[in-house]
Each structure stands twice: as structure tokens, then as C-alpha cells.
Image (cartoon, helix red, strand yellow):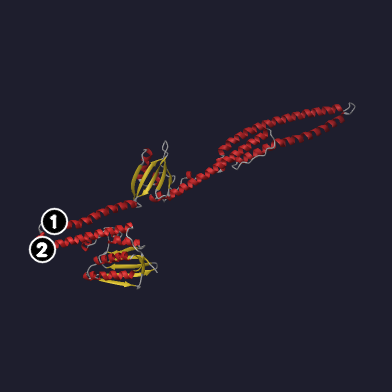
């Protein structure tokens, strides 16, 4: 939403208005001088013509013999006067045309320019007062045209700069809001409208308290207008569930003409910071638990338990189990770090998905039977080619089948299915185990997240398996989804790019 002052247009009449007023004043002064000049010329002409007429009529009267009748004298004088009148009027008409035509042209050209049209030049054929006035007018027109051209170029440059500024502002990820000294909004780009949810109405021209329903912003603007220091603020927008950081700066000038607010969406940054804190906390806890157990068993052995063969054998076995758990945790952390950093080299190629599913199912049959579970497999096609890395896909399948076995009660069933759906190869791992509550389903792919921490440690999980699975699926161009209900089991669905 751009303010009107960024889009002003300057037309040629508007550009020349100030110049035209001064020039018209000069022109009117010249016309007044010209009128006085013509009056004087006409008076002189009429006076001279009158003297010529008197002199001519006197000559006519003297040339008539005294013996001529008075009537003849009158007719001669009348005839001579008529001839002189015709000659005089002809001369007057020519002189009037000579003097009045430039005046009419100047008047018409001045009216044209006054009406907002481009000025016209007036032809000048003589080098007298009228000619010099016409020449001065033409010079004025030339200067006005040059000035209009310059202003048009300036207008084009300003319009181009405004378009570039508008494009930059609209392309910015950060929101930008400009306000004047009365806290009236002058500018708000689309990012600001989105961040503060201002799309309900046009905010430009409105006051801050009317357009933005966040008291923190109002107080920030007031502080910025009153103090010279840059102000910073971070707040939550309740209706968009986002966190916004604002930097407010005063506009230069005395008194302060306004302020500019730059808004940053830091929602994702804060979420990642929370994840990092949780990750550090979880890693510390996961590492601390086996280390504490190992330390406790070792201390017990050192304090005399070594002499009891059965107790020492048990404690050494527990130490070995905790060490193995610690080793698995560290290996999973390293594997996840390599996947995320891109250091792990995967050879993504066309492979038979069904072959990997059969291999993994065969490898888990013994564990499933020991837990009194049925591990079944069903394929719609014998060969199902998809795009993946062999080792990476084996890791995905092993994690999903292993989790299904660990979280299914004895007597339950784990089913593995595959099919082709247009451009996707889809395989599912379904169980009828404990299930996952709906509020936890979006978080089960996070590092170290466990729905039931006690049961997870009991089955020996590190809490990183599903996170590794998710990253591998994304690395292969696919995705993973989960659908589950408490007490009825879960279905994990993996989509991979199909290969013909």
C-alpha cells in the first residue's frame, strides 16, 4: 500500500504554472505599453490626416476661380474629401492590420498557454516595438518549452525511482511501516500487512491506534518520536500465532517528521531456538542416564561386589547393555548430523522397493515370533521400482518395522504393504499396537521425542529413529505420514518417487 506522495504526477501545464504566471505578468505589462503606443500612433495619424485634408481642401478652394458658382465649389470640395477619406481609410486599414495582427497573435498564443496547452511561437516580420515584443515572447516560449522538457524528464526519473522503490518494498520479506509526527500511517508494504494481519482494510492514511490493534506498537512509536535512540521490541501476534521483532527509527529532521518501523518474522527462529534448547537438554539427559547407570554399577563392583560371582556377572551385563545403548545413541546422533549436513553420500537410484521390504521383514521375523507377533507382507506388484538409496531405504524400513514390533502387544499383527499410485511408490507399515494420541502425532518425528518415555527406554530406543527416517525420506524426494488412534494401532505411510 503506497502513499500518494510517492506517485505524484506532474503534467506540463502544472510544471509551467509558476513560470507562466510570471511571464503573463510581463506579457500584460507589454500589452499595456503596446496599447499606449498604438493610441499615440493613431492620434498622430488622425492629426496628420486632418492637416493633410485641410491643406488639400484649401488648395482646392484656392484653385477654383472666383467666378465659379458656390455649388460647384462645394461639389469639388466634397469630391476631394471623399477621395481623401477613401485613401485615408485604406492607409488606416493597412496600418491597423500591420500593428494589430501581431497583437492578436500574441493574445491568442497567451490564451492557449493559459489554457494549459503547449505554447506557440508568433511570427515577427518587422523590427519595431511590436517586433521586439514578439521576439521577447518567442524567447519566453522557448525557455518555457525547455523548462517543461526538463521537468518531464525529472518526472520520468522520479516515477522510475518510485516504481523501483515500490518493487523493492513489496519484494522485501521484512515489513516496513512509515508514520508521520501525528502517528498517521504513510506507508505499509505487503509484508507488514501480512505480519500484523492488516488486510481487512486500507491502513494508509489512518492513525496507528485505528489500524493496528497492538498497544505495544503504539507505545513503541511514541517512544521513537520522543527519543533519539533506536527502539527495539519483540512481541507475539495472538491471532496469527507468530512472533515479530520490530526496529523503530526516527526520520531525520527537526522537528521529527515521523518514524520508520521494520518488522521481522522471528517465529521460525524462536522455534528453532526452542528446539535447540530441547535438543541440548534431551541429549544431556539421554547421555546422563546410561552413564549414571554405568557409574553406579562400576562403583558397586569396586565396593566389593566383584567377590560375588553372580552379582558381578549381572552388573557387568548391565554395564555392557548401557554401554551399547550409549554407543547406539552416539551413532544415531552422528548419522543424523551427517544426513542434515549433506556429508553422508547417498547413491539415489532406481531400486526394487519390494526386495528391500522382503529383506527387512525376513530379518525381523525371529524378533516378531519371540514376542508372539504376526509379521505379514503383501505386495500388489512383484517388482516395484522407486528412487532411493539402498542403505538409506533399508534404514527407513528397519526403523519402521522395529518400532511397530516394539509397540505392539503380544498376539498382535504387523503388516507391510506396497503399491504404485501414479508417480509415487507407496509402502505402509501398520500395527494394531498402543497407538499415538493425535496431539503427539505432529511431534513424533522430532529428535528425542517420546510419547511414553518409560516404555521407550524399556524397548531400548534412542528417540532418534523417526527423525532419521523423516530426513532420509525428504532426501530421496519423498515424504512420510502417520495415522494413528489410541488403542487401535498406527499406520506409517512412505511415499517415494516412482521409476518406470
Q: Name the spot of residue 445 as percent of width and height, x first.
A: 30, 60
Residue 6 in view of the camera: yes
Q: Quadrant location of residue 303?
A: bottom left
Residue shown at 15% from the left, 56% from the top: 296
Nearer to me, 488 or 343? 343
| Circle nearer the N terminus (1, 2) | 1
- Where 315 sits versus 68, above or below? below
Per the image, label 1 sits on a secondary structure element best described as helix
Q: Secondary structure at mark 2?
A: helix
Residue 71 position in % (x across, y down): 87, 30
Instruction: Name above or below for residue 293 compared with residue 262.
Output: below
Answer with left or right where residue 126 lies relative to residue 462: right
Q: Dot 1, how many residues are within 10 Å of its Cα: few (below 14), some (14-19), or many (20+)?
A: few
Q: Quadrant of residue 438?
A: bottom left
Residue at figure coordinates x 26%, y 53% from the top left: 280
Disc 1 from disc 2: Cα separation: 16 Å
Place of residue 348 in the rendered image (x, y in percent of width and height, measured from the top left): 36, 64
Q: Position of residue 240 (x, y in %)?
A: 36, 52
Q: Name the residue tied to disc 1.
A: 299
| Residue 219 visible in image | no
Residue on which the image places disc 2: 309
Tell me which residue sits at (35%, 48%) in the image.
244
Q: Residues within 10 Å of mark 2 (few under 14, many from 20)?
A: few
Instruction: Classify residue 85 by image quadrant.
Output: top right
Amino acid at each position: 500500500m503506497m502513499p500518494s506522495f510517492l506517485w505524484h504526477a506532474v503534467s506540463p501545464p502544472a510544471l509551467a504554472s509558476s513560470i507562466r504566471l510570471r511571464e503573463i505578468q510581463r506579457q500584460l505589462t507589454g500589452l499595456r505599453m503596446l496599447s499606449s503606443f498604438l493610441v499615440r500612433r493613431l492620434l498622430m495619424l488622425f492629426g496628420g490626416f486632418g492637416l493633410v485634408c485641410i491643406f488639400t481642401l484649401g488648395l482646392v478652394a484656392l484653385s477654383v476661380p472666383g467666378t465659379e458658382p458656390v455649388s460647384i465649389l462645394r461639389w469639388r470640395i466634397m469630391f476631394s474629401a471623399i477621395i481623401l477619406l477613401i485613401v485615408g481609410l485604406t492607409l488606416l486599414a493597412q496600418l491597423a492590420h500591420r500593428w494589430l495582427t501581431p497583437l492578436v497573435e500574441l493574445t491568442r498564443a497567451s490564451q492557449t498557454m493559459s489554457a494549459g496547452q503547449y505554447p506557440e511561437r508568433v511570427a515577427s516580420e518587422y523590427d519595431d516595438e511590436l517586433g521586439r515584443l514578439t521576439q521577447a515572447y518567442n524567447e519566453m516560449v522557448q525557455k518555457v518549452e525547455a523548462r517543461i522538457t526538463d521537468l518531464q524528464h525529472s518526472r520520468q526519473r522520479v516515477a522510475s525511482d518510485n516504481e523501483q522503490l515500490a518493487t523493492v518494498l513489496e519484494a522485501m520479506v521484512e515489513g516496513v511501516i512509515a508514520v508521520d509526527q501525528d502517528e498517521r500511517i504513510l506507508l505499509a508494504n505487503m509484508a507488514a500487512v501480512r505480519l500484523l494481519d492488516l488486510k481487512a482494510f486500507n491502513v494508509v492514511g489512518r492513525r496507528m491506534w485505528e489500524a493496528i490493534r497492538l498497544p505495544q506498537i503504539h507505545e513503541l512509536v511514541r517512544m521513537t518520536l520522543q527519543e533519539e535512540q533506536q527502539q527495539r521490541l519483540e512481541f507475539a501476534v495472538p491471532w496469527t500465532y507468530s512472533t515479530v521483532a520490530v526496529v523503530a527509527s526516527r526520520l531525520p529532521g527537526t522537528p521529527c517528521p515521523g518514524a520508520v518501523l521494520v518488522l521481522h518474522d522471528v517465529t521460525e527462529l524462536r522455534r528453532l531456538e526452542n528446539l535447540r534448547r530441547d535438543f541440548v537438554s534431551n541429549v544431556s539427559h539421554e547421555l546422563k542416564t546410561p552413564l549414571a547407570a554405568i557409574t553406579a554399577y562400576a562403583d558397586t563392583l569396586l565396593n566389593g561386589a566383584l567377590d560375588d560371582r553372580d552379582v558381578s556377572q549381572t552388573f557387568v551385563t548391565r554395564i555392557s547393555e548401557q554401554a551399547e545403548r550409549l554407543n547406539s545413541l552416539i551413532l544415531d546422533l552422528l548419522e543424523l548430523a551427517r544426513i542434515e549436513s549433506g556429508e553422508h553420500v547417498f547413491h539415489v537410484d532406481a531400486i526394487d522397493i519390494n526386495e528391500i521390504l522382503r529383506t527387512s521383514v525376513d530379518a525381523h521375523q525371529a524378533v516378531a515370533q519371540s514376542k508372539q507377533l504376526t509379521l505379514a507382507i503383501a505386495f500388489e506388484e512383484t517388482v516395484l521400482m522407486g528412487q532411493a538409496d539402498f542403505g538409506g531405504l533399508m534404514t527407513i524400513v528397519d526403523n519402521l518395522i522395529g518400532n511397530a514390533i516394539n509397540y505392539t502387544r503380544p498376539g498382535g499383527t504387523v503388516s507391510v504393504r506396497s503399491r504404485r499410485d501414479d508417480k509415487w511408490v507407496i509402502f505402509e507399515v501398520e500395527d494394531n499396537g498402543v497407538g499415538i494420541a493425535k496431539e503427539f502425532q505432529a511431534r513424533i518425528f522430532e529428535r528425542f521425542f517420546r510419547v511414553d518415555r518409560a516404555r521407550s527406554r524399556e524397548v531400548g530406543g534412542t528417540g532418534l529413529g523417526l527423525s532419521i527416517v523423516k530426513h532420509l525420506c525428504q532426501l530421496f524426494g519423498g515424504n512420510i505420514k502417520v495415522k494413528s488412534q489410541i488403542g487401535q494401532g498406527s499406520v506409517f505411510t512412505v511415499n517415494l518417487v516412482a521409476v518406470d
